[in-house]
Image (cartoon, helix red, strand yellow):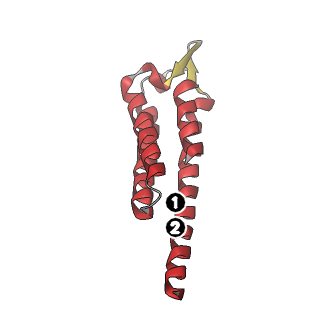
Amino acid sequence: MVLAIIALVLHLMLPTGTAEGNALFALDTVLAGIPPAFAIILTFFAITQFRNRKRQQQVNWISIAAIAVTYAIWLMSAERQLPDYAPDWGMYVPGFAALFLLIANYRIRKDQQLVDSMDRLR
């Protein structure tokens, strides 16, 4: 989950594309910066919920949905419609964050299964 936070912070810092010779950033518009910031906050919250694995997974799914909204806003942005627009590395980084959160959910589920199996042995 820490890697997802790092990826989302990089998304906010790196240019998401270039158009007309100018670098475009996610923070150029408020609407494009809100979902990744929300996902960062939720992922921080998920890290603190290590005692409640089900809530941790739910919060991770909400963070993944916020990342999907980030891509939806990018697809509908006016800058992307410019004829010389070229996407940059900053736009691919949230996909890695979503992948890291999916891996975290998988590992949380495996951990829960291990705890459940240990409870049966007692």
Which amino acid, by three-letter code, is at mark 2? Arg
Q: Quadrant of residue 10?
A: top right
Give how far across and how far down residue 119 sits, in percent: 49, 81
Residue matched to label 1: 105
Seen from this angle, which residue lies furthest top? 21
Task: Name which residue lies at 53% across and 63% down.
Answer: 108
Name the residue: 58% across, 20% down: 18
Name the quadrant containing residue 38: top left
Compared to 88, does 6 lie above or below? below
* Residue 117 in view here: yes
- Return the residue found at the far left: 31
The picture quadrant where one finds residue 114 is bottom right
Q: What element does badge 1 sit on?
A: helix
Q: Residue at x 49, y 21 (%)?
A: 82
Q: Residues within 10 Å of mark 2 (few under 14, many from 20)?
A: some
Give the residue at the far bottom of this rendering: 121
Q: Which residue is mark 2?
A: 109
Q: What whole-number distance in Å separates the C-alpha atoms at marks 2 and 1?
A: 6 Å
From the viewer's perspective, tell me whether residue 33 is left or right of residue 117.
Answer: left
Q: Would you say the residues marked 2 and 1 are in contact, meaning their CB atoms lie under 8 Å apart?
A: yes
Question: For the residue carrying disc 1, how many other residues have a C-alpha within 10 Å: few (<14), some (14-19), or many (20+)?
Answer: many
x, y percentage for residue 8? Answer: 53, 36
Q: Whole-percent x and y of residue 6?
A: 58, 37
The answer to whether residue 67 is above or below residue 83 is: below
Q: Residue at x 51, y 87 (%)?
A: 122
**Which residue is at the front of the view, 114 or 103?**
114
Residue 47 in picture, x, y percent from top left: 48, 50
Q: Amino acid at mark 1?
A: Asn
Residue furthest out toward the front: 122
At numbered mark 2, what does the secondary structure look like: helix, strand or loop?
helix
Is 28 on the left or on the right of 10, as rendered? Answer: left
